[in-house]
Image (cartoon, rainbow, N blue to C red):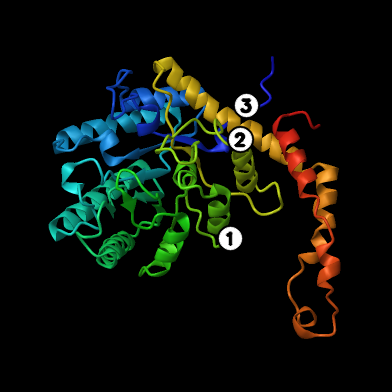
Amino acid sequence: MIDQYPVTAADRFTFGLWTVGNRGADPFGSAVRPALSPVEIVKGLAKVGAWGVNLHDNDLIPMGSSAPERDRIVSEFKRALSDCGMQVPMATTNLFSHPVFKDGAFTAGDSRVRAFAVRKAMTAIELGVELGATTIVFWGGREGSETDALKDPRDAIRWYRESLNHLCAWTKAQGWGLRFALEAKPNEPRGDIYLATTGHMLHFITTLDHPQMCGVNPEVAHETMAGLSMVHAVAQAMECGKLFHIDLNAQRIGKYDQDLRFGSEDLKGAFFLVRLLEGTGGYPAYTGPRHFDAHAYRTEDVEGVWDFARGCMRTYKILAVRARAFDGDPEVQGILQSNAGGTAALGDAALGGTAQIDPDAIATRGLRAERLDQLAIEHIMGVRQ
């Protein structure tokens, strides 16, 4: 039987070492799966059709490794990448696991911690460049607080800015054409995390010394867990040219960060997100990697991990086909066109000229959103041809 949704390198699907490498541990239970080495992960991802693999620094090189050990690990990893035809488009830094970051990394009250965090990030950026990464993601998992009695948030944001300004200037001085993607999250592991949403990050970027090299990395779970719209966050980032990377997964509103298989929750939201990314509605498509920052259920063994990875990619491909069908549907286009008359740009006539605007008449007009949404549902379910 011919697969109607084949995964190819052109899809630019990526996973992190920490995603398929997740062993199923949680705060209430230990690991349920054996550890997979970075080389095993690269080979497994290549087998299921992924294009690339991303990593935190310590996903590959344990903290405290000697220089010879570091070089041996990197050499073996690069060989596996070459043998499997895999890319490393993005690298990031773990600034949250070590106890030294218990009160933050770039926002820690102790300047020695901030200095250590910046130096660690520099080393991670060097590793990313060596592996071919062109995007560096910064997720401030510990950049927050449980109580604002300890420090003023204004100080924390200033320290955050100072750290990123230093890293931007240093990176530019090396002559690397890297882009920094800042990742927002409202809470967990901190009670409240600074710059909690993509919108917060987009404003923060305007205050940096080098805003042109900084964008965002929105994540489905991070926006959804606070009850926000991932589609709107991504659209805002795309509209201002700041969608530098994206984390795809699934999440239920109000829960802790679940990192579920893409599309396994809120299928309609996933559909409209894929429609946005693929540009089937008329705007240019997102051309960067489609990164799945998710992990398999705790119920799974290693084979279940690869089922999970295949599922993420397959769901995306199916939704991309459904989105193209939706936007190519004559009835859909008819409804959209019937509403297009009121979407023209404002002009002098509309703002204060002789044009007559009858609000009562306009208010009586139905927009057929119910029918349009039903058509979307039917396309998602595959019953609309």
Q: Which corner quadrant of the image does residue 81 belong to?
A: top left
**Residue at image point 17% right, 43% down:** 99
What residue sits right under mark 3 in the picture?
6
Query: Which badge, 1 or 2, comes first in the chain's sequence?
Result: 1
Task: Using the rendered image of the protein, determine whether residue 273 is visible from the camera's viewpoint.
Answer: yes
Q: Amino acid at mark 1?
A: Glu
Disc 3 and disc 2: Cα gap in Å?
20 Å
> Considering depth in this image, is 240 or 81 the residue closer to the camera?
240
Percent from the top left, x then y, of residue 218? Answer: 47, 49
Q: Quick one: quadrant of the C terminus?
A: top right
Query: Which badge, 3 or 2, comes first in the chain's sequence?
Result: 3
What residue sits right under mark 2 in the picture?
267
Q: Amino acid at mark 2?
A: Leu
Please indicate whether residue 195 sits to the left or right of residue 232 in the image.
left
Q: Secondary structure at mark 3?
A: loop
Q: In front of the other: label 3 or label 2?
A: 2
Q: Amino acid at mark 3?
A: Pro
Task: Using the rendered image of the protein, determine whether residue 287 is visible from the camera's viewpoint.
Answer: no
Q: Secondary structure at mark 1?
A: helix
**Residue at image point 56% right, 56% down:** 238
Disc 1 and disc 2: Cα gap in Å?
24 Å
Q: In front of the other: label 1 or label 2?
A: 2
> Considering depth in this image, is 224 or 284 the residue closer to the camera?
224
Query: Which badge, 1 or 3, comes first in the chain's sequence?
Result: 3
**Residue at image point 48% right, 53% down:** 244
What residue sits right under mark 1 in the picture?
239
**Is residue 2 shown above or below 119?**
above
Q: Which corner quadrant of the image does residue 188 belong to?
A: top left
Residue farthest along the bottom direction in this orientation? 353
Percent from the top left, x then y, of residue 95? Answer: 26, 47
Percent from the top left, x then y, of residue 318? Answer: 65, 31
Please indicate whether residue 291 sits to the left or right of residue 274 in the image.
left
